[in-house]
Image: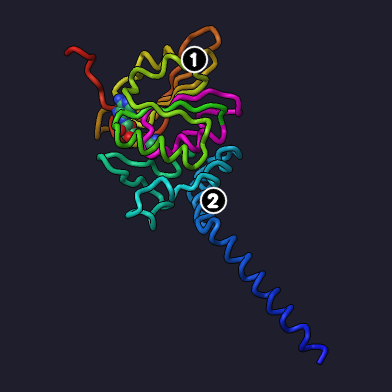
């Protein structure tokens, strides 16, 4: 008799537990995939900065890839995002972010917003992110996506990244996510003393290397060539009137 009275309570309890577990899983069913991505692709290749690892684990990468590529959202390679452009491989995003050596208070400029993924990762580490994208469709989509996901410290501008973002300069860090044959001079100008600029340098479709330019406190430039990479080209925009 006594035992039976507990049955409805037990049933309600079990239902509650099932609901809570389901709700948690529904909240973020991609979390495990991100954790695997971070440990197997990023930490395994030597990225150590805790801020970077944490940001890579937090940003919902699956919301930055086109629905058709959802199943490969965390795969170990770049993916198409439309307009002939790509979202970089997770490791490259993490590695390049680590190379900027951000501590948290920086104003960062990104050239080549693309999907907005790299900007989102930067925004969890730096104070402010300014990102410029040339292709209007990508630019608008990324701006909407970032706003909807609550990345309030990111601003996106549709325009030519070769010009940088002079009104918001100087930047303590600048990251270019498309390859240019040379370091754009206006970007170097907009780099703060003590700041770091990272860019894939090389011809479109050819041999490119990541290049890290450091501006010393007295304004000198120290340039280091790092690893070979493969990026879509930074498209040159002819000056108006030509
Ligand atoms: N960082 C992006 C991936 C960038 S792919 C991400 O996280 O998804 C490179 C991007 O640079 C493309 O979207 C391309 O349209 C853009 N791009 C190319 N030339 C540019 C230019 N001159 N100014 C601004 N963006 C440019």
Question: Residue at the location (54% across, 53% down)?
Answer: 35
Point out residue 76 in the picture as x, y percentages from the top left corner: 41, 50
Q: Residue furthest bottom?
A: 1
Q: Is residue 119 magenta?
A: yes
Point out residue 84 in the picture as x, y percentages from the top left corner: 25, 40
Q: Is 178 above or below relative to 222?
A: below
Question: Is residue 208 among the parts visible in the rendering?
Answer: no
Q: Secondary structure at mark 1?
A: loop
Label 2 neighbour load within 10 Å: few <14, some 14-19, many 20+: some
Q: Secondary structure at mark 2?
A: helix
Label 1 neighbour load within 10 Å: few <14, some 14-19, many 20+: many
Q: Which residue is mark 2?
A: 39
Give the colouring mode of the picture.
rainbow
Q: Earlier in the sequence, mark 1 or mark 2?
A: 2
Give the CA separation, mark 1 to mark 2.
35 Å
Q: Which residues are magenta?
A: 96-125
Return the residue nearer the eye: 129 or 183: 129
Is label 1 in contact with label 2 (beta carbons under 8 Å)?
no
Residue 54, picture quadrant: top right
Q: Which residue is mark 1?
A: 170
Q: Is 177 above or below relative to 41?
A: above
Q: Residue furthest right?
A: 2
User: Left or right: where does residue 10 sit relative to residue 99?
Assistant: right
Question: Residue at the location (55% across, 45% down)?
Answer: 58
User: Left or right: where does residue 89 sit relative to residue 56?
Assistant: left
Q: Is 207 above or below relative to 46?
A: above
Return the residue nearer the eye: 123 or 35: 123
Mark 1 residue's CB less than 8 Å from ligand 1: no
């Amino acid at each position: 008799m006594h035992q039976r009275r507990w049955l409805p309570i037990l049933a309600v309890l079990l239902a509650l537990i099932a609901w809570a577990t389901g709700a948690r899983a529904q909240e973020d069913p991609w979390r495990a995939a991100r954790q695997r991505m971070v440990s197997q692709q990023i930490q395994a290749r030597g990225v150590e900065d805790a801020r970077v690892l944490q940001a890579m684990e937090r940003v919902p990468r699956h919301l930055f890839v086109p629905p058709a590529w959802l199943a490969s959202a965390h795969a170990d390679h770049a993916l198409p995002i439309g307009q002939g452009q790509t979202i970089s491989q997770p490791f490259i995003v993490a590695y390049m972010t680590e190379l900027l050596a951000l501590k948290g208070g920086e104003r960062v400029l990104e050239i080549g917003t693309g999907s907005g993924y790299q900007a989102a990762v930067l925004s969890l580490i730096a104070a402010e992110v300014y990102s410029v994208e040339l292709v209007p469709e990508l630019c608008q989509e990324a701006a909407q996506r970032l706003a909807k996901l609550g990345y309030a410290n990111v601003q996106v501008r549709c325009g030519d990244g070769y010009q940088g973002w002079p009104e918001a300069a100087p930047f303590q860090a600048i990251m270019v996510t498309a390859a240019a044959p040379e370091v754009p001079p206006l970007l170097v100008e907009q780099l703060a003393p003590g700041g770091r600029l990272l860019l894939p340098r090389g011809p479109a479709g050819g041999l490119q290397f990541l290049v890290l330019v450091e501006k010393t406190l007295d304004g000198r430039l120290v340039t280091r060539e790092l690893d070979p990479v493969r990026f879509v080209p930074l498209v040159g925009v002819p000056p108006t009137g030509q």
